[in-house]
Amino acid sequence: MSWFKRLCLFLFGLSGVLALVALSLTWVGPWTTQARSMLEIRWYFITLEVLVCVAGVGSLLCVLVSLFAPRNPRETVVAQVDGNQITVTRAAISSQAKHVVEADGTCIASSIWVRVRKRGNVRVRVRVKPKKPIDVVQRGERLYAELSEGLSHVCGDTVRSIDVVFTEPEQSDMPFARVETEEEVAPMHREAETHQSGTTGAITVPMNAPSPEMVVENAEPEAPELMVERQPDAEADATTSLPASDSEEE
């Protein structure tokens, strides 16, 4: 039922109840005198007239719908052969639709609504409940094609519309997909890079045995000290070698 029909039905029902109560109080009850005196007030009388008119129009529409609305017969004519008619019942159409939906075992036909006319014009509406989460678009297109083919075996060319409505699955075992914001993703990436590279900021933290590059880097600050220790030895060698050269010349 659409929102407009629901609104009209609500206004019709409310107007009928209020008008019935207001008019009944003038005849029966302990406040008959007060109710009759209220009719002399202009705004109360106009309001009551409006309520009675709305209730009357709604009642008239209900009578007309009950008389002239097309009924939904139990069977419909699907073909004519040599002046004879071939009919099929709504129960047969509903059974065929249920068989097509539940053929592969992935879905259940929770409810099937079939509307027919005396001579063709079949409309089918199926509520499908998957047993597990599925791709609704892909499965819906395939199911629509299967229903069109399956119902054509029963109804022929009289099928005018097929509506498929998917409901929530029985087992929701798929993980909930949550969209992470940039503020949540950035710390996770930094933590992952820290675990992978073993670094935190500009300080290098070895995870296992030290690599050759790290040993060389640690040895570089000691190189000037070694040079300073070896420099006096070199000068001593130079000073001791000079007298030897002079003795040879002599």
Image (cartoon, rainbow, N blue to C red):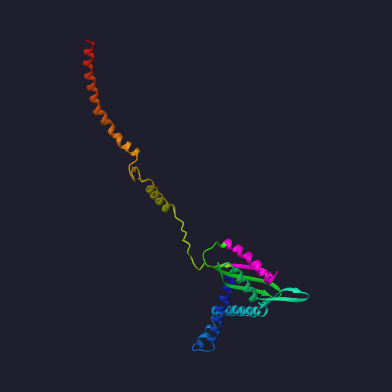
Q: Quadrant of residue 160?
A: bottom right
Of residues 226 and 76, the one drawn nearer to the viewer in this rendering: 226
Regarding residue 46, the answer to whether it shows in the image is no
Report whether 145 appears left or right of 250.
Answer: right
Task: Say which of 187 and 53 sits in front.
Answer: 187
Question: How many tags in the picture?
Answer: 0
Q: Main secondary structure of the magenta part?
A: helix
> Hey, which residue is sitting farthest top in the picture?
250
Q: Is residue 138 above or below residue 7?
A: above
Magenta residue span: 137-164
Residue depicted at 55% across the width and 85% down the height = 23
Q: Quadrant of residue 199?
A: top left
Residue 159 counted in the magenta span: yes
Most foreground residue, 106 or 87:
106
Left or right of 155 on screen, residue 245 = left
Residue 52, percent from left and from top:
59, 80
Q: Quadrant of the C terminus?
A: top left
Point 41% across, 53% down: residue: 184
Q: For residue 66, which quarter of the picture?
A: bottom right
Q: Nearer the viewer, residue 245 or 66?
A: 245
**Is 249 placed above or below 55 here?**
above
Residue 246 percent coordinates (x, y): 22, 13
Residue at left offset 75%, top offset 74%: 80
- The answer to whether residue 20 is visible is yes
Where residue 83 appears, x then y in whole percent?
Answer: 78, 76
